[in-house]
Amino acid sequence: MGHQLLAGKKGIIFGALDPTSIAWKVAVKAKEEGAEFVLTNAPVALRMGKIKELAEELQAPLVAADATSLDDLNQLLDTAESEYGKIDFVLHSIGMSPNVRKNRAYTNLNYDWLIKTLDISAISFHKVMQLLYQRDLMNEWGSILGLSYIAAQRTFSEYNDMAEAKALLESIARSFGYHFGRKSKVRVNTISQSPTPTTAGTGVAGFDKMLKYGEKMSPLGNATADECADYCVMMFSDYTRKVTMQNLFHDGGFSSMGIASEILEEL
């Protein structure tokens, strides 16, 4: 049983695919805490993933939407508005790189694929917020979150063009956070999560080693998907009303480390 931190709150959750997804975990936790929400993912994800099962379990409306398409996003927002009127929270948990999927080296990028990476993984965040802003669909003191990774600030050699996407995502959160805050006191933040064994995360070359390295470097160990869901719920709640335009590290202390004795012992 939850603590009803989100009782009466309505939202939209992007990106749940299967039970390993952070967005999936967030949906389950948000429901436990009293929230109602629309679930959404790309049409191909609805065919290939298990989000339909999640929607049935949580009794949540499910809308297929390509987050890069303004037409699809408007239809999604039409559904949310008809169900709830204005909403209180949004989770953007979307990321995909054709260059990563097709093992294209960072030093030999396909630029058409790079543009697609940026559109899917970052510009879609702006598109969602722009429509919410223009249609005035967020309640005052609402909360919008995007999921990021420390490769936005530091070099992770195998993270490829997703590093650029995450850097853009975080910049969009800061820029739109100003405008949304002034308009209706809506806060916009990103959460920089530990490497997490999701379907998307494990597609990065050397992911298993990144996971082990993060575990050894972080004083508290890697943050899990379940723990990230707890953090997202807190950020959606009224307890974080004055937190905005921040990139919030949720990584067990990894982001503040130089080197750990556990790593030195192995060298």
Image (cartoon, grey):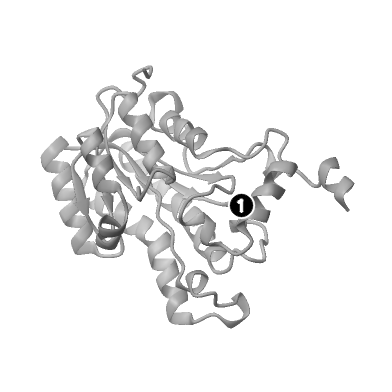
Quick one: SS at disc 1?
Answer: helix
Residue at the spot x=34%, y=31% of the render?
30
Vertical side of 98 occupied by 266: above or below: above
| Percent position of residue 80, x then y | 18, 43
Residue type pointed to by label 1 = Ile
Left or right relative to 8: residue 23: right
The image quadrant of residue 9 is top left
Quadrant of image for the N terminus: top left
| Percent position of residue 101, x then y | 48, 70
Residue at the spot x=27%, y=62% of the render?
66
| Percent position of residue 250, x then y | 58, 39
The image quadrant of residue 224 is top right
| Percent position of residue 124, x then y | 35, 60
> In this orientation, which residue lies closer to the viewer: 118 or 251?
251
Q: How many marks?
A: 1
From the image, tell me which residue sits under label 1.
150
Instruction: Kindly tell me whether residue 142 is visible in this rendering.
Output: no
Instruction: Kindly tell me whether residue 205 is visible in this rendering.
Output: yes
